[in-house]
Amino acid sequence: MYNLSCYNPSSFILVGIPGLERFHSWIGIPFCVIYVLAIVGNCTLLYLIAVEHSLHEPMFFFLAMLATTDCILSTDTVPKLLSNLWLGSQEITFSGCLTQMFFLHFSFVVDSAILLAMGFDRYVAICFPLRYTTILTPRVVIKVMVTITVRSFCVILPDVFLLKRLPFCGTRIIPHTYCEHIGVARLSSADISINIWYGFSVPLMTVFSDVIFIAVSYAFILRAVFQLSSQGARQKALSTCGSHVCVILMFYTPATFSILAHRFGHSVPRNVLILFANFYVAIPPALNPVVYGVKNKQIQDKFILLFSLKKTQ
């Protein structure tokens, strides 16, 4: 019975943000505001793309997939964080922990792949404008979206089985606000070298390959732009990439900093790393709709039209 309970633990304890327990109630307020903004912003974006036929283009279909993934990422982590900070609900079941861990890493890999697909979209639009509609047909877009989902699922699913094989006979206290693969694996007394190898190398290599292909696509884009004779044409071409570049920077820059901080920042206080990790999963989903609303004139115009119609009704 003891061995069975080790391999099938009933629950874990998420301690929240250690050292800042007195401020948990206050810390929860900005996260609640950010979460509401993320859900409202992304749902508005999805609604606009769904009802406006002028937005039924490959770029906006990829954007709709990004908004959906952002909603999943926010909902996977922030509500549990708020219940921990405000209600003291620190317990999470083993199956709940595995589910949260899966959707956390799955969303990250999907987001990275969507940014690559959006980079390819900009590459085709700028380098082959006359063939854009024949290359990125609705059928091709659907295939790309299905491929992104299946690839991400296949990359992250082994994490679940790698955790389920481990015994958890010792402490079941997770010094964090959510479950992530390596953090949970370190609670086991068994050998977790496979978990560390797979958990770091495979998802990181997948994302790293996305970054390389994004960089290559933008190298071709810049070469095509600087071959244009008109200054106005150059600015117009580059302006179509502005929102995508901003989202890329918001996604990869904090991720890189977080990885480096966990790997080399041993002098950084634990609560600072946990706070940063939570802001990383909360802020980009809230900012992405804002970036596309400000940078993309088509979405901006439809957003203004939507609210002006509501006011006149």
Image (spheres, rainbow, N blue to C red):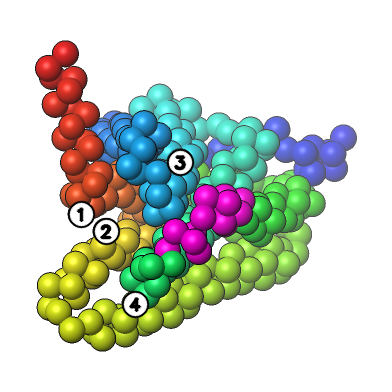
Q: How many marks?
A: 4
User: Where is residue 35, by image quadrant?
Assistant: top left
Residue at 38% across, 81% down: 220
Q: Which mark is residue 295?
A: 1
The local crowd at label 3, few if under 14, some if 14 to 19, many if 20 or more residues have their Cα within 10 Å, is some
Q: Which mark is residue 243?
A: 2
What residue is disc 3 on?
68
Kindly check if marks 3 and 2 are in contact, taking CB atoms under 8 A apart as contact: no
Residue segment shown in magenta = 132-146
Kindly check if marks 1 and 2 are in contact, taking CB atoms under 8 A apart as contact: yes
Q: Secondary structure at mark 2?
A: helix
Q: Amino acid at mark 2?
A: Ser
Q: Secondary structure at mark 4?
A: helix
N-terminal of the two: label 3 or label 2? 3
Q: Amino acid at mark 4?
A: Ile
Q: Is residue 170 left or right of residue 74?
A: right
Kindly check if marks 2 and 4 are in contact, taking CB atoms under 8 A apart as contact: no
Residue at 67% across, 36% down: 95
As for residue 143 lying within the magenta part, the answer is yes
Nearest to the eye among marks 1 and 3: give it: 1
Q: Amino acid at mark 3?
A: Thr
Kindly check if marks 1 and 4 are in contact, taking CB atoms under 8 A apart as contact: no
Above or below, comparing residue 152 to residue 37 in the picture: below
N-terminal of the two: label 1 or label 2? 2
The answer, for residue 278, to whether it is visible in the render is no
Q: Position of residue 256 (x, y in %)?
A: 40, 69
